[in-house]
Amino acid sequence: MDIFTLLTLIGGVALFLFGMHQMGDCLEKAAGPRLESLLEKMTRDKGRALLLGIIVTAIMQSSSTTTVMVVGFVNSGVMRLSQAIPIIMGANVGTTVTSWILSLSGIDSSALWLQLLKPSSFTPVLAAVGVAMLTFSRVEKRRTLGGALAGFSILMFGMDMMTGAVKPLASDPSFQSFFLLFENPWLGMLTGAVLTGIIQSSAASIGILQALAATGGITYGMALPIIMGQNIGTCVTALISCVGANRAAKRTAMVHLYFNIIGSLLCMIPFVLVRDMVPIFAQSTTLLGIAVIHTLFNLLTTAVLLPFTGALEKLVNLTVREAKHKGEDQVLLDERLLATPTFALARCRALTARMAEMAKHSVTEALGLVDHFDEGIARRIDQAEDDVDRYEDMLGTFAVKLNNMSLSESEGRDVSRILHGIGDFERISDHAVNLTETAREIAEKQVKFTEDAEKELKVLFLAVGEILDMAVDAYNRGDVALARKVEPLEEVIDDLIDELKLRHIHRLREGRCTVETGFVFGDLLTNLERVADHCSNLAVCVIELSEGAYNAHEYIREAGHERAFADGFAQMREKYRLPQEAH
């Protein structure tokens, strides 16, 4: 092999890896929302979880990426180890799709319809279409599809380069003697494991093996141990990824390793015993033959071990034992999830929704303390505020990193909504704490409101409760129609607070209310007004990101929405009408 052949081979491998990465990223982006729904629906039983692993890996073209993603989910508490095991098994089956695609390069027939299936016949057309879509189309879905087509074309071109580089070596004596080393099945397995561990992609190492098979120097007996080793080598990525993770995540990575080692040994031992007695093992394999072996091996291993997922879980629990002192912090957002932005975004949405509910619940509980103060509930609100602060820091840092990833337009809007919203939720939680302090002061100083003031506050509390429900629901669902209903209610709450302040001054002048009562009354009104303002901000965020309105507060009243705003305001004004004062 001269230097130019070596450079061609290296270039082919580089293009192959880049094309696979490009195609996988674009397919993942195109299938993003569907992958989220699959995750939610298909982890309920073994069969569905297995199918999920197959589908996700077939889309992303990498069992390593799928396994690292699952490690991240387990580390974040999204998924249990028992749910993760069938997904990992499915990932091993899903990665065989790549070898079937690559086997098309080996088609050798004069029949026109078979020639059309050969990548060299249709790849140039796909490359031209893909590049044209990337260059000239402004529609995101078309650009994503174009990127996938271009990635596939680069992948197949890299495969052709590798095959072309090694084919002339078929008659080279030194190259033939190199192949003789693989007559030892254990050495073949080791070679497959080391090669895959280095490039961290079993699909890529299978592609290299298929390129070597095109020389005619690889027999079925050589290929099978190498493929077994490649399945073991692909575990390296997951093992590296679990460094610094919690025990559940480490167990998930070990499941991947044990599954492939046990499966390989179950096949390797009988293979060594019968290899010399089965004639086909001495025959030269083809690209299609490699794909068949790869698929059959993974299907057989999965079929044998799937019923024993419980035993596999016990094995990894024995290997990675519980800490003597439990209390390991759960990682709510694992950076391994960034390898799959679609799933990382789904996790961010879920945590933001949890943060929103905590803030809303804190305000609701704080309002209940005004009438009946409970120190236990007050401590719970303080703890929730600490949790919300932690969520804000964590989500803000993670969302900024996620925003730099390759995202679709809708996913980019969701990240922006998260970055805009978490600050408002944190402030709402702060106001819940302020309301709690005011309620504590009312209880300690035994402040008594007049009967009129109590009735007025109840009306205001109900209005604030409704605007919180509306804003949080509109934000979590991205519901523009519901978000439009928030602003009229916020205006009503502002008017209510202004009216309550005037009534308080009137009672103060009449001597029915004290200055001390006025201080805590004013604190309540101020914090509730701020809560309503933040609810308005959340609703405005939804409208701005959905419709591109720069100043959505004004936009709600303009562009044909004046009537809807006026109707909403009138409806809410009537619903939260203050009772007449007693004289």
Image (tube, grey):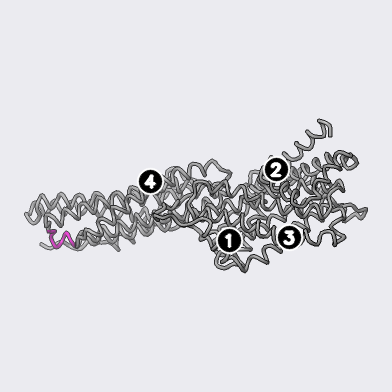
Farthest-out residue, right: 110
Q: Is residue 77 magenta?
A: no
**Which mark's residue is nearer the viewer, 3 or 4?**
3
Q: CA distance from mark 3 to mark 4?
A: 60 Å
The region drawn magenta spans 448-454
Element at badge 3? helix
Q: Is residue 196 visible?
A: yes
Dot 1 and dot 3 residues touching (CB under 8 Å): no
Element at badge 1? helix
Q: CA distance from mark 4 to mark 2?
A: 41 Å
Neighbour tally class for label 4: few under 14, some 14-19, many 20 plus, Cα within 10 Å: some
Neighbour tally class for label 2: few under 14, some 14-19, many 20 plus, Cα within 10 Å: many
Badge 4 amino acid? Gly
**Residue 121 location (% of width, % of height):** 84, 48
Q: Is residue 494 visible?
A: no
Q: In the rendered structure, which disc, 2 or 1, sits on the residue that comes first in sequence?
A: 2
**Which mark's residue is nearer the viewer, 1 or 3?**
3
Badge 3 amino acid? Ile
**Residue 106 location (% of width, % of height):** 84, 51
Q: Which residue is mark 1?
A: 85
In the displayed structure, does residue 133 sit left or right of residue 310? right
**Residue 489 location (% of width, % of height):** 33, 56
Label of residue 423 in the image: 4
Q: Which residue is mark 2?
A: 17
Badge 2 amino acid? Leu
Q: Nearer the viewer, residue 519 or 277?
A: 277
**Which mark's residue is nearer the viewer, 4 or 1?**
1
Badge 1 amino acid? Ile
In the displayed structure, does residue 513 sit left or right of residue 437? left
In the displayed structure, does residue 160 sit left or right of residue 61? right
